[in-house]
Image (tube, rainbow, N blue to C red):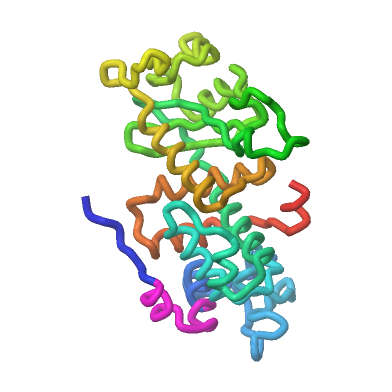
Amino acid sequence: MQKPETLSTFEFFRKFPDEEAARRFFEERRWGGEPVCGHCGSVSVTECKDHKPMAYRCKDCRAHFSVRTGTVLAESRLPLLKWLLAIYMLTCARKGIPSTQMARELGITQKSAWFLAQRIRETWLKDRDDHMDGDLQVDETYVGGKEKNRHIDKKTNPGGGAKGKAVVVGIRDKNGEVRAKHVADAKGETLNDFICENAAVGSTVVTDQLRVYRALPGLGYRHVTVNHQVGQYINGQAHTNGIESFWALLKRGHYGIYHFMSAKHLHRYVKEFSFRHNTSQVGAMQLINMTIDRMVSKHLSYEELIRG
């Protein structure tokens, strides 16, 4: 298999040496060389002198707009070059990049870097609408700090375990694609609803022996289990090693890079890791292009973000 195309930081700045180069790149990617009004969709536009108050003005609706209009970049005062560098860093770092490091690299505050990263993650939230089929691996995991490390007033379960942690459920197909989601609980209805949303009826679903999965045959799936409690990790050709390796990557990013993922924002972090996992064989520039393509019609204000 051919290795994906890489892009070093040196090559990045050769390709995008200044703000003007970044602006042209964003415009070419979004419009293909012909500006389109972000308000009404008209192509009857004129370029504004000195790009003030914005780069373009629509002759039909008479509104000013730029390549940011109608995207997650709207209302951001950060230069497009910094947006582009942030996308590059977040897509190419296998286990993610903390907002503190991003702030140092971009020359902005940690708060601005955190908000910037969350808006980029927002573009990755939606999975494909089709159903996965064939042999599928399903598993759930728990994300949160260790009970022994919590402050006394934050302890939820003196015995440790999963209580008080956030639940994430995931599904992986034979080609390695992963879909994962932060869910409210690990009850049967919740986990099986996730499977029905993502797996085609008739597929073979491999799980551990958690009792809630016993309902799968009644939902139209062939159910195969592996019994981890007795040291069984493969049943014939059936196993859950693939989805469990994804959990290992997620948790290395959690403990080693981000250190803390609040339940309020966990869904974005989960999608960040599944996006990078599913595009691990995609070249760096293609990843940047994919992210920019997804930015259209997305919006996330700081108020919406902290309100959750």
Q: Residue furthest left?
A: 1
Residue located at (71% from left, 76% from top):
64
128 relative to 48, above or below = above
54 relative to 134, above or below = below
Q: What number of labels is visible?
A: 0
> Taking the image as drawn, is residue 219 in sight?
no
Residue 205 placed where, x, y %? 41, 20
Residue located at (60% from left, 76% from top):
79
Residue located at (73% from left, 74% from top):
63
Magenta span: predominant SS is: helix
Residue located at (30% from left, 57% from top):
4
Q: Is residue 80 left or right of residue 232?
A: right
Is 142 or 203 nearer to us in this picture?
A: 142
Which span of residues is magenta-colored?
9-23
Residue 304 placed where, x, y %? 75, 52
Residue 267 placed where, x, y %? 60, 42
Q: Is residue 1 magenta?
A: no
Q: Is residue 20 magenta?
A: yes
Q: In this view, does 162 lie to the left or right of 239?
A: right
Q: In this view, does 38 lie to the left or right of 24?
A: right
128 relative to 69, above or below = above
113 relative to 45, above or below = above
